[in-house]
Image (cartoon, rainbow, N blue to C red):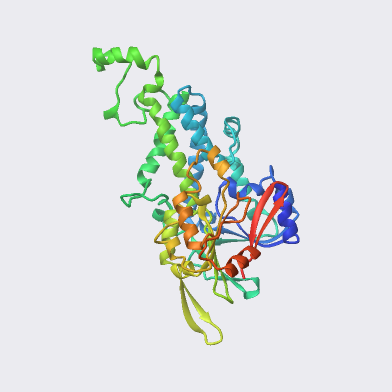
Amino acid sequence: MEQVARSIKDACNGHIHLAIVTHEHWDHVSGFSEHQARAVFDEIQIDQVWYAWTEDPSPRNKLGNKLRHEREAKVRTLRQAAIALNGMASPLAVDRAQRINTLLSFFGFDSSEDIAKDLSANAEESIGKTRSAFDYLSKRSGVSVRYCRPTDDPVMLAGGNVRAYVLGPPEDEDLIKRSAPSKAGREVYEVSSELFMDQQLETAFERLSGTVANDRENCPFETAFQIDIASSTLMSPELLALKTATWDQEPWRQIDSDWTAIAESLALNLDQHTNNTCLVIAFELVATGQVLLFAADAQVGNWLSWQDVKWTLKSDPTMREQEISGPDLLARTVFYKVGHHGSHNATLRAAGLEQMTSKDLIAFVPVDKSQAEKNRWHEMPFEPLMNRLREKTAGRVVRSDATVEPDLANDLSDTEKRKFLERLYRSQVENAPYWEIQIP
């Protein structure tokens, strides 16, 4: 990461006019960590940083503060659950521990030892290295901080040659918490059950660790569904025999172990809701009307909200009003940085890619397939999405882990192919490859 940061420093001559920090995930902010490349960024002049409105700490931002506090509570809860899971011997617990630890890695926790160490950290460090990296620019002297909302007027950049529109995140809690598509059209995680999961999990691992008494009063389940397995008066002879034969020898079969499923669901919930607080920016090149779309890791609810956003511009010198909408920006998109490494729920169909109708559309996919496989995300990037991207772009899809130029479609003319390849550039920085494209 230090090598990448030095490449950035060289490319911008040590001066970044605007940095955009999309959301609080390690793979988006780790370069700002003191453990990686912060020292290099300290050497770069940075004028402005933009964050999503959800990160505004002012008291008037009640929903943003609520979402952030929920996120912090979930991370703390999951850290403790991960320690409990790592100490369990059952194959189910080990498997779930691996998946939870993978999701916790997005908050800077690299191992069970790291998780255990951070349990004793003070409140300022309570959600790990990611928060420190995320806050780096907002706390750095001389950097102007802006918290962006979709209701903000577009911002002129680059001497009036570029206009920036804030598409998301939406100022609607239900949309922020609508992370994944459902066949029935319902949210995957309902708000009420989400909060109850938190409470269930907290009680379950406290019982497991002995922090609270292992009694019926502190049970995470309703009284009507509890059975005192130690009392023969509440159990039939057959049930007592079953307990003797299995529960004592294999404790993981008891329902007390079912909290591990809640832990995994809560970890996925935390990951997806954080993604949905992404700051999404569309840059319009004023001279041509072309749009560059950077969706970060935005998921379903964030994308859906773009259908309703609108801005009114006044065109000089006539001062006539012009209305710009989210679908209009999608229709003029010529560069799409594909959301969330090409995952299945980070590029919408009808309310997303199908609205990108420009014949000049190009897609860049920030993905490392080998790393995705290590994390057991075997469908990342999602092949049906990749196929449709190739169709929409005539093959002009560039993956960050690719070592060769993309395979262009036959329906592109030789001239179009040549122009595209002339604008495409691949660099190798000490084994840190990246691709560049010049937008005409």
Any part of residue 247 in sight = yes
Q: How many marks?
A: 0
Residue ID at (76%, 54%): 43
Position of residue 190 in the picture relative to residue 368 (left or right): left
Residue 134 locus on image (x, y percent):
60, 50
Residue ID at (62%, 68%): 419
Q: Residue furthest bottom?
A: 318
- In this view of the protein, which residue sits in the foreground, 87 or 171? 87
Residue 108 locus on image (x, y percent):
59, 41
Residue ID at (45%, 42%): 268
- In this view of the protein, which residue sits in the foreground, 407 or 16? 407
Residue 119 locus on image (x, y percent):
57, 33
Any part of residue 231 in sight = no
Position of residue 231 in the picture relative to residue 327 (left or right): left
- In this view of the protein, which residue sits in the foreground, 349 or 13? 349
Position of residue 403 in the picture relative to residue 240 (left or right): right
Q: If the image is split into quadrants, where does the C terminus sit?
A: bottom right
Residue ID at (52%, 58%): 295
Position of residue 401 in the picture relative to residue 429 (left or right): left
Residue 367 locus on image (x, y percent):
56, 49
